[in-house]
Amino acid sequence: MTVARPPLSVPRFKPSALLRAASIHAFIIAMAFVTLFPFLWMVGTSLKPPKEVFRPGVHLLPTAPTLGNYATAVQRAPLGRFLLNGVIVSGSILVLQLLVIIPAAYAFARMTFPGRDLLFWLVLAALVVPGYVTAVPNFLLLSGWGLINTYPALILPFVGSAFGIFLLRQFFRQIPGEILDAALLDGCGAGRLVWHVLLPLTRPAIAAFAVFSIVTHWNDFFWPLVVIQSSHLYTPPAGIAYFADAEAGANWGVVMAAAVIVVTPLVAVFLVARRQFIESMAHVSIKG
């Protein structure tokens, strides 16, 4: 005896759905190209000989690629020193920020004290204050302390981060209270609770904040030019400006080669932390 099988259902072809999906993908590809075009232009220019840099028309790729611009950039400017300064300044700022924002975010998310909501609203208000507004007070304060033209002048004004406090607070609030209660019943103090329980659970948020912090302070062009006069303390963007004016002149191929060298560590940082970064942004977008 044979059992009759039900007929297989074949998905119905919908031209409108296919057209909509193709339109969405075409739009995404177009936006990705627009976003990446400046970076591709920078890389292409860094590989062009001087006579091709200002050739009329739009030519993204060089006709005769050369690595001579990179050799010239390395020989004529202390790029290694600029990169080391960027690592020292960006790394120090990130470490000090984490030491400040993690306890602050935990207090705003899990503790009750007078004025908590008012203080948190003040933190949110700080998000809309442009950094340039505090430039003069910070400069006067650092000048009074005798810290102008030093590493602390590049680091101390950015130890606090309202964005970091807000981001970690949102993640701390999403952690079930039962987990924290169980840890407290086991004799876990506040410090061990944050270090051994909360931090592993909020690793994506910390990775996302680390990417934001490193990119922001690595690319900061304004503040180093305000507080630094010695070229050996220049961070990468300030070093590129010095390099372009003093060494390369109108040779923009060399300048673009130096810019590619300076940007490469940021691309590496993002590729290493991209999974946690995307996970964190999706978490914030979905759960608010």
Image: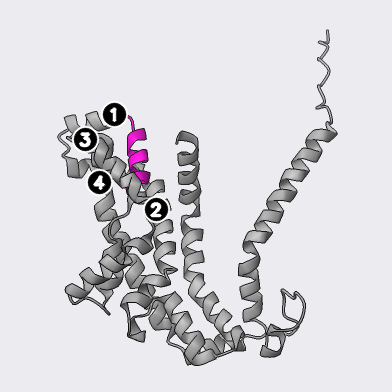
Kind of residue indicated by mark 3:
Met
Q: Nearer the viewer, mark 2 or mark 4?
A: 4
Identify the secondary structure beneath mark 1: helix
Which residue in the protein does label 4 denote? Answer: 104
Residue 68 in the image, given as x and y percentages of width and height: 61, 89
Instruction: Residue 135 in the image: state x and y as whole percent.
Output: 32, 66
Indicate which label's residue lies in the foreground, 1 or 2.
2
Residue shown at the point (30%, 68%) measured from the top left: 136
Q: Amino acid at mark 1?
A: Gly
169 within the magenta span = yes
Q: Is residue 56 above or below residue 98?
A: below
The range drawn in magenta is 165-176
In terms of depth relative to the viewer, which is nearer, 80 or 164? 164
Q: Is residue 197 visible?
A: no
Residue 177: give its label.
Answer: 1
For disc 3, the marked residue is: 111
Callout 4: SS: helix
Residue drawn at x 82%, y 25% as measured from the top left: 10
